[in-house]
Amino acid sequence: MRQSSSALRPLLAARDVVRHQTTAINDEKDPAKRNTKKKEGKVVRNYASAHTQVAPEPPVQVVVPTTMDTTPNPEAQKYQSVDGSYATSHVAYALSDAAFIYPITPSSAMGEFADVWMAQGRKNAFEQVVDVREMQSEAGAAGALHGALAAGALATTFTASQGLLLMIPNMYKIAGELLPSVIHVSAREVAGQALCIFGGHSDVMAVRQTGWAMLSSHTVQQAHDMALIAHIATLKSNVPFVHFFDGFRTSHEVNKIKLMPAAEMKKLIPPGSVERHWSRALNPTHPTLRGTSQGSDIFFQCAERTNIFYDGLAEIVQETMDEAAPHLGRHYKIFEYAGDADAEDVVVIMGSGSTTTCEAVDHLRAQGRKVGALMVHLYRPWSADLFEKALPKSVKRIAVMDRCREVTAMGEPLYLDVLASVGPVRPDVKIIGGKYGLGSKEFTPEQALAIYDYLADPGSKHRFTVGINDDVNMTSIPYWDQARVDTVPEGTRQCIFWGLGSDGTVGANRSAVKIIGDNSDLMVQAYFAFDAFKSGGVTSSHLRFGPQPITAQYLITNADYIACHFQEYVRRFTLLDQIKDGGTFVLNTRWSADELEKYLPARIRRQLAEKKVKFYIVDARKICDEFGLGKRINMLMQAIFFKLSGVLPLEQADRLLKDSIQEEYGKKGAKVVEMNQAVVEAVNSGTDIPTQIEIPASWANASDDAPKTKTGDEFVDVIMRPMMDFQGDKLPVSVFTPGGVFPVGTTKYGKRAIAAFIPQWLDDKCTQCNYCSYVCPHAAIRPFVLTDQEAVGAPEAFVTRKAKGDYQGMQYRIQVAPEDCTGCSVCVETCPDDALVMTDAVAEVPHQKPNWDFAMSLPSRGHMTDRNTVKGSQFQQPLLEFSGACEGCGETPYIKLITQLFGERMIIANATGCSSIWGGTASQTPYTKNDKGHGPAWGNSLFEDNAEFGFGLAVANAQRRAKLVDIVQEALDSQVGSESLRKMLSQWMKDKNTGDKCARYMDDMLAALEEQQKDSPLLENIYAMKSVLPNISQWIVGGDGWANDIGFGGLDHVLASGQNVNVFVLDTEMYSNTGGQASKSSNMASVAKYALGGKKSNKKPIGEMAMLYGNVYVATVSHANMAQCVKALVEAESYDGPSIVVGYAPCIEHGMRTGMARMVQESEVAVDSGYWPLYRFDPRLEAQGKNPFQLDSKRIKASLMDFLKSQNRYVNLQKTNPKGADLLRGTLQDHVTSRFNKYKRMQDAHKLAAAAGPSGNQVTILFGSETGNSESLAKELGTDFERRDYAVNVQALDDIDPAEIADMGFVVICISTCGQGAFPRNSQLFWQDISRDKPEGWLKNLKYAVFGLGDSTYYFYCHTAKLIDARLAELGAQRVSPIGFGDDGDEDAFHTGFGQWIPGVWSQLGTKTPEETLFEPSISVEHTPDEHPGKFHWAASQPVASMTGAVRITPETHSRNFITIKWKTDMPYQVGDSLGIYPENDREVVEDFLKGYGLNASDVVTITNNGTRELPQCISLSDLFTTVLDILGKPNHRFYSTLAHFALDKAEKERLVGLGQQSEEYSKMLAETAHYVDILNMFPSARPPLQYLIEMVPNIKPRYYSITSAPIDTPGEVHSLVLIDTWLTLSGKHRTGLTCTMLEKLEKDQVVDGCIHPTAMEFHDHEKPLVMCAMGSGLAPFVAMLRERTKIKQQGKKVGACALYFGNRYKASEFLMEEELMSYVNDGLLTLRTAFSRDDPKKKVYVQDLVAGDAEMMHDYLVKQGGAVYCCGARSFIKPVQEALKAGFVKAGGMDEAAAEDQIVQMFTTGRYNIEAW
């Protein structure tokens, strides 16, 4: 029992006296017994206990002291400008002990107010702070409400729509147990064919059978008053009440009303009613049993026993209204009539439409019509007697208006009640029912007038509709055909403000209403309309001010003042249709006064002139930028409103506005206050803001602009565009598809153009990482690749650069969608290369729009790359684009990424929330489809049942596919269809559940099925079920509120089911969609609505809970680690079972102090501080003997407190409650640390048993890797150490705490160098830390070894490794072995240097030689003689045909053979690229080898490949070893080690083991260039089985040859210059390279497999000088460049000077392409220098010598003119040329050595020094 206040002690005493009285008042209706007197005081009427002989509870008769002051004091009420939610919550809070809340639009605000007041310590009428508790769902709130009532508390809740429906079971219980309570409902539509958050009565009508009384409010004032009446009446009657009013129209309308203080409300509490409620509470001091199980013998009787409580309930409510009247100063009736006393036509209505109907009545009565309106307040219990008495006797016709549908009944609910009440007693009265206002559809005076006209029509029919055009059911009545009426009170000023969501317009208007309402005698009203977009959408604020109360509950149609805060709206909306003649129009625009004639639409100009509007313009953004306010133009526009409207005297308005700024923005700091006050001062102190425009008379005759160009999409043109233009109210019923189905891919037609600034791409800085596309919330910036031929047709501004990686030979561009971009800047802030800058949208959109249109015309080329990577995923078409999400939204990038990975085969079950609003708003659908018409299928059921909904989808599709599998198997068994079709069906049976493998042949299979289905019923059935042939990917998406709270039970069940579904939780850590209420995902110390005092509990560990099942894939992801996110999503989707991925989603509600533009950086800090740890739990690993838990956040790297200080949701608590904030933050810090340590233990658990390894030795291997080479090498090295009995820990450098390195004992570091000497991303923090000052000898106990990976031709070769090696030594660490270098240019790439370095490490460590273990093969091989394999081609290759064959250009007698080849190909390429040729092994050699190996060359095998390597599925052994396996390549040492396992001969085995350990013989083998065939023939006892042999021999790789042609010169051709590479081994064997062998014999028209490979030879600015240094065939790219420049010069364009330094051996035989080169010299294009080193053995001249001799020219070309230098050829001349240039800069430029060195470095870092060497 709650603690009572002193004010209630007399009542408590009275309760104690009467608690055990047993005398009953047998006849409640006996006035004598009801009103008897006693000496002690007055015996109060006891409405409940007087007739409650329900054993064992005794009837209660309470004696109340007469000293209580109950004198009405209506003057105690104060005017305040509030909305309906505030008005209601004000009363509910005052008269409740507890409130149980859960957010649901539009009722959330009521709970928010109660939570705020609790946090502020506000006391209720009983002098207590109300206990406000957020529950996990509305059902939970109802259950808690029931419990609180049962315990004797006065409790309440607030809800709407399906939230109310979830309470129904408890509502039956509460009513059945006669527990007094009030549920306050902002009535809203219940989701049917669609979700609708707007007003309607379908929810309250769905509970009319529960036994709760139902009381309706029609205005904001009534919301306050009826709430009070409901709370009093429920205490009188013991019957619970639903108090309801229209959602949004009343709940969110701001009005100036009178609010009653809590002390005055207490006067109305029936004496003894609270005590009586306490006495019936469940309590051990007077125990009872409640909620029993009853049988058929007594249930009926017990149910009927409560009827007496309802019999006089209507009278009790009316009595309460009467009693409240003197306190309120307002008198209500349960049925209120307004109109003519002799009315013949009466409209019966309930809700906000009542006031509009009354306005229509007044209008018609002024015309002499006898009409009236009967408004219903008390709907349940329905009093037929009182209703009939309220009707005029004269009534002939009644129209009953319902705000709901009940299509299965004879009529809607209110109509049926009226019919039952009036029909029997007035049979001559015509009664018809109508519907209006569903989904907050506007109900205007004109519609109300139309109802009266229709009612008077003899032909009027039942079940009509008003406000829509129903051209299907023909129920809609005619519109009011007379002039628009203005029924608001005289003197009312009406204003409309059009704003852009998040520009502050709505907030400013709320402030304006408060300022005017609270500081003048004017009455005020405000209502705000929004479109479907979360932020950046359209807002319209409708404000009214006047001397009389304002009850016009509809949008303004006759405005005195209209302000348009966003320029684009004048083109989209009919803004001035609503303005009065002589009204004021203010336009925020970038257009100058002179430009208005050009840009202002004709309709607007015409209306300005015709209506004689006072027209003003202002460039608000420009002014606000000057004051530092940016896009927050609200205060400027508000100041203009006060200045122009004259609602308040300007001096008063100026003072009040500045005061409101201090109040509103004071918590954001003095600077924010000063900026806003300064802009107000600028407006009010001058005359230039705004600028008044004199309207030319010619504007009255302005010709209409051309109509919008139709898209050709009927849905877009007929439905979507009118809806976007706010004309959706006019759409007829017939245009919509029954069942609520809408098409996808429509947002691309939206073109909202809301960004003030958009990103511009700087091509020269871009490294093509695609991060910008990855993080873009709206898919408004994307990478595109195109061929040179396509580039020819591109707009001039469509600048591209050479594509890298899989798109070599093509052009690359980052392109923004200028009219779809929201200007959030996330891409700019995320770009690691500063390759994006924000630019003025007005200037940039005209340039970028054609670029975007062109980009969208390009074919999608996502199939050409690996989609399961960060970069590759962004080349896939995003199947989520241009959504209505907020700028910088952290949710959409995740779902966009998922659609890029799996979109064409996915189904989404989406929980109601932010993601269902930005993802599922009718008409504007961001989910789209690919060029095949495939894309995500999206559905939303409810908020609470999303997991179950998705589960049902998955089960259904699994069942359908199971049937399809049976049919396919039967078809295969029956051998129906062609051989090729059977082959595809057979493959489908293998691939059906493995990602998108079957997509590769799906089109061919469907085509074959379509053609052959007529031949077999089985094939016909398969084709009929073709929609489930793809491997459908089922996703269940929702927010943290759904997953952790209301939907958790269902989600838990689905995860436990084992069903293959994928769950993605968008974790904003709050209910973002309903305004930012706390959820169980909210973290401790965070401030959110419903947790304004700071959340006291830790975040719910939903991932950990899911892991407990053991068979659920679980991951946490973040934008901070894109690669980990992609990996987790791919793993989750591939897992055959349930998966759940939880993504940290920064949200605008977090109040990020750096802004949403830096949401990626905020995510990084969240991860680095341990706030959001990243991990993956993959049950598949456990089956492999591995730890299923993988902690991807290896350590805490950043300060948690710094992170918390960056977000207002944590900062605000520090301001309001510093001590409490510190305590909670400290607890959160402890929790974060403890959680990380727990995860660390989980990560390391499987290693504990190994301790320090059998040898007791430990090693930590650290890597810094950008492309993965260093990481792979580190892991390989880790395996080698483990085999030597070391305990091994392999981590990225940034994943360790550098402070711990001193205690690690022994570390090995493998690190690459990026770009121009930069550290890889996962090593930068480590380097920053150890670069700081450290104590002397800090690392004296550490042993270390460093190995660097790089390319020795680059200036910064292994730079990072050198820095780390030197720094560790400087800090006292002991170097175990000298630093090692792996050169990418070596024969075996970095493995060569590693192989030379690692033996020294083993030697220094004295480790044992490990035993080799045999790997498990990832393939299996089956002999399939009946299969008929096709020709194998590499996936990355295309056929190229030799036009010439090999043409030798050196003399036949010369030892070296240079050849040229012309190829015919459509492959795109750029000057500087190389042509890759896939060679084939000599077939004779292959067949000899196979024969010797014991294999039949003609055998056909089928390979089942479980790895990632590219292998044919079905192939003959001859083709396999000729075209796929590189058996004539050179083995590395690991091949020997593996081969040793199969050697049966002991001596051979020993030799192989030695070779595997890189013995001296291994070096000889490398020198001899022995290939795999040689080795296998050399060791005949070693015969690996075929599946092992295939795994041991790598694939043939393409060999690359520089291209001499230019696409602009010889389109469709590629020319090659090749040196046929031959050599003698040490033993005298003659060798020729594999590809060279093939090319030397190449014949005309021979076709080979080829590809294009980009190189460092990327030529940019053709106007700059170019220095080219070439050795041998390195001449090729420079010939290509010269050919290109020649063509450009022929086009009349400027080209820069060119200097070529060409070196070879002999001029007579090796002056390659001499004639062509001399032609360029003669044309003045080229300065040519040649160096033939062997012509004069006494004086050898090399390229570097010639470069040194041209010091002046080099300095001029490269330093003064900023030209570029390119070197191509043998690695040996790269460094000497570099030294020659440096010496030249010193000599000719007067530089010192350091400056010359800096110049070289600067050329490298800016891309002006490029090298291609071999």
Image: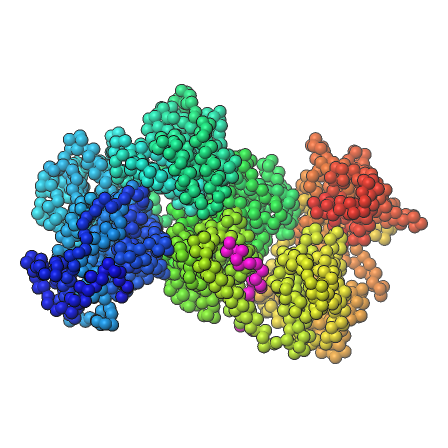
> How many numbered marks, from 0 up?
0
Determine if residue 63 is in view. yes
- Asked if residue 1359 lies left or right of residue 521, the reply is right
> Which x, y percent locates residue 1253?
64, 76
- Asked if residue 17 lies left or right of residue 260, the reply is left
Q: Residue furthest top?
A: 697
Task: Identify which residue is drawn at 45% across, 34% down.
Answer: 681
> Which x, y percent locates residue 163?
31, 56
Residue 1199 painted magenta: yes
The magenta stretch is 1183-1205
> Which x, y percent locates residue 1341?
70, 69
Determine if residue 246 is in view. no
Task: Identify which residue is drawn at 27% across, 44% down.
Answer: 78
- Asked if residue 1525 lies left or right of residue 471, the reply is right
> Which x, y percent locates residue 948?
38, 61
Q: Residue furthest right?
A: 1738
Residue 1800 painted magenta: no
Q: Quadrant of the C terminus?
A: bottom right
Q: Which residue is more in the foreground, 1102 or 541?
A: 541
Q: Which residue is more in the foreground, 1109 or 1641?
A: 1109
Quarter residue 1198 falls in: bottom right
- Asked if residue 398 lies left or right of residue 1465, the reply is left
